């Protein structure tokens, strides 16, 4: 399993602490340094069963500068959203855990982290 984190994020630190406490095996990806490509973002969206605007942090400065709240949320603009996430990774909601069974979760709660651990037990 892999977890995309920003070490400055308290939700990410909490998720890592819980993974460690549960003895889960995982790889950390500091996605602000190891920025996901558009293809990787598409793959994670497929695994999350979400759209790019569903995992976009619209309160970030970059989101306001881009005017994301005004962007359409439809099939025609999906690629524009994905490009924005790849170009501005700070906009990606965190943490995201991708489990070995092919699922993924935005793990902002303890319950979501535990669900990811269960998915990883396969």
Image (cartoon, rainbow, N blue to C red):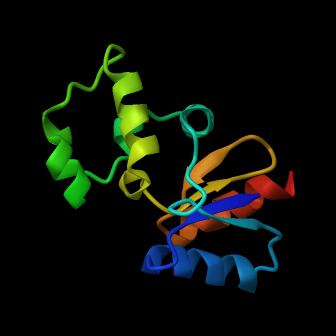
Is residue 96 visible in this depiction of the protein? yes
The x, y position of residue 46, in whole percent, is 59, 31
The extreme right residue here reads: 122
Whether residue 37 sits left or right of residue 59 in the image: it is right
The x, y position of residue 94, in whole percent, is 47, 61
Identify whether 10 is placed above or below 68. below
Whether residue 75 sits left or right of residue 23 in the image: it is left
Residue 90 in which image quadrant = bottom left
Identify whether 42 is placed above or below 24. above
Residue 34 in which image quadrant = bottom right
| Residue at figure coordinates x 50%, y 62% from the top left | 32
- Foreground of the two, 73 or 35: 35
Residue 52 in which image quadrant = top left
Number of residue marks: 0
Is residue 59 visible in this depiction of the protein? no
- Foreground of the two, 23 or 77: 77
| Residue at figure coordinates x 70%, y 76% from the top left | 19
Identify whether 35 is placed above or below 12. above
The x, y position of residue 11, in whole percent, is 46, 75
| Residue at figure coordinates x 24%, y 59% from the top left | 60
Whether residue 22 sits left or right of residue 106 in the image: it is right
- The quarter in which the N terminus is drawn is bottom right
| Residue at figure coordinates x 20%, y 59% from the top left | 61
């Amino acid at each position: 399993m892999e977890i995309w984190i920003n070490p400055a994020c308290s939700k990410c630190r909490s998720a890592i602490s819980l993974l460690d406490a549960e003895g889960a095996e995982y790889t950390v990806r500091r996605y602000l340094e190891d920025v996901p490509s558009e293809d990787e973002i598409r793959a994670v969206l497929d695994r999350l069963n979400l759209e790019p605007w569903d995992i976009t942090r619209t309160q970030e400065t970059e989101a306001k500068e881009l005017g994301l709240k005004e962007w359409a949320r439809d099939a025609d603009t999906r690629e524009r959203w994905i490009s924005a996430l790849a170009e501005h990774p700070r906009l990606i909601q965190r943490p995201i855990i991708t489990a070995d069974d092919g699922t993924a979760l935005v793990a902002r709660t303890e319950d979501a982290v535990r669900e990811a651990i269960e998915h990883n037990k396969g």
